[in-house]
Image (cartoon, rainbow, N blue to C red):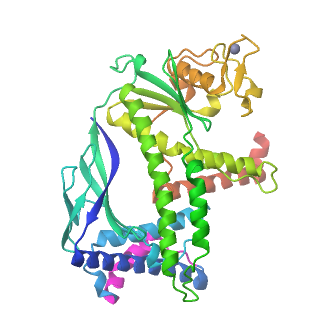
Amino acid sequence: MLTVIRRYTFRLYPNKSQTSKLFEARRLHCYLYNAAISHRKTEYQYWSKSVTYLQQQNALPAFKECWPEYKKLNSQTLQATLKRVDLSYNRFIKSLSQKPLFKSIRNYSGWTYPGHSGWNALTEGKHGQVRLRDLGITIRMRGQAKQWGTPTTLTIIYKPYLNQWFASFTVNIEVPNRKFGSDSDLKYESMLSIDLGTETVLTAYNGQEFLEIENQRFTLRSQKKIKSASKKLRRKRCPNYQKKIKASKRWKKARKQVSKLQRKVAEQRKNWQHHVTTDISRRYDIVVTEKLETKKMTRKAKPGSQRKRQKAGLNKSILDVGFGTLNKMITYKIEAKGGLVLFLPTRKIKPSQRCPNCGTVHKDWANLSNRYHVCNHCHFENGRDKSSVMVMYNVATYQQPGLGTHLEIVDLISSTSKNRKHTGSMKQLGEMKRQKSQQNQKSLGHLETPTSQKLG
Ligand SMILES: [Zn+2]
């Protein structure tokens, strides 16, 4: 059996006294978060020292002596809050995000129980209750999980604009383990290759026929309504906490209207995504697709670029479809039934530039406006997206001319292999530093040591 991790979120229905306890815990966690940031800031400003996570964790007992109200909270949740600070500082150090700021209680979401202790999920996957031992409360919750397993972590979330509480569990689920190879019980007939695009959202090929799904353009359809609603919002008196101006009642009402419309678009998109991905995962065991890098794809146009508007439009339509979510949904749905998702390395295979018939790589096919491809080598012709899914299908079935006959050759990455990017773990940070220092040593050695010159 293979274990996969899924996240399930249930809405909580706390009563009055439970709600006030939840709010208090949230407030304490928010203060701790801000205290940890302030600690790091002052240490750096006045003594130019950087504080590590471990130092802050070791300071927790002393902190609790000063602030006895923290004693009743689960100590692992306090550590998890410090870890949040550490994660955002790590992202900042790697220049992946901006400098961590103090968080206002207004947009502080909640806290996490990182382990098994301190809570119980009294549910079989449908409705039930959650017990938070440190607060001494058992809250009713509502929701349904497709597959329930062993819950491992719990995050309590408050959404201010909804005034609702949620419990988000990560759950370990056992799925049947099947291997991809000659002795496998997965058949090639149930394999599908998928390409995601902006015009035709999804082009797929199963060896015999093509499947095409057009872009629904959810945002575009309701954009007019959202625009006029946000225009109304701008004309109302908005809050300014520094100048101590409160939001007007009309502003609050108008904001509710805007978020309602935005939520509707999001729900429509999600619903559609679930329909598409469930359909695919029911019919196919193996899905072959490209490794997507949505972050890079939706990057802003370079300053001074003449194609700024086009790039903005392309970004909007990529985000409208929700490429990342589609890929994730397909992956977890296929995994849950014991299937396999294969990510092909785009740069090596070049599916959109390679002729599926003879394997010739055409550089001029890279132009996105070129939507129909004719091979000048073997006169094979097909739509761009169609020929690219054909290439992917051929690669996965060892049939593609011009490429090796084994999947190992193209560095195949399957969804079950661990290749996620972590930004936070201490281990990774250490590894990066070591690499850097080794590189420095190498380059220095190359420049300065006489032995290297002799060798060169
Ligand atoms: Zn050709």
Q: Quadrant of residue 331?
A: top left
The quadrant of the picture occupied by the C terminus is top right
Which range of residues does the magenta coloring cover? 49-66
Q: Is residue 418 visible?
A: no
Q: Foreground: 19 or 332?
A: 19
Query: Please, is residue 424 above or below residue 188 in the view?
Result: below
Looking at the image, is 427 positioned above or below residue 110?
Answer: above
Q: Is residue 430 left or right of residue 123?
A: right
Q: Position of residue 125 (x, y in %)?
A: 22, 49
- Describe residue 229's horizontal placement relative to residue 173 as left or right: right
Looking at the picture, how far across and down is residue 329, in whole percent?
43, 41
At horizontal 55% and vertical 43% (from top left) the residue drawn is 321
Residue 25 figure quarter: bottom left
The residue drawn where x is 64% and y is 48% is 315
Q: Quadrant of the N terminus?
A: top left
Give coordinates of residue 201: x percent, y percent: 56, 36
Q: Residue at x 26, y 50 (%)?
A: 144
Residue 60 lies within the magenta run? yes
Q: Is residue 279 visible?
A: yes
Q: Residue at x 61, y 33 (%)?
A: 346
Q: Is residue 295 above or below residue 185?
A: below
Is residue 323 toward the left or the right of residue 32 in the image? right
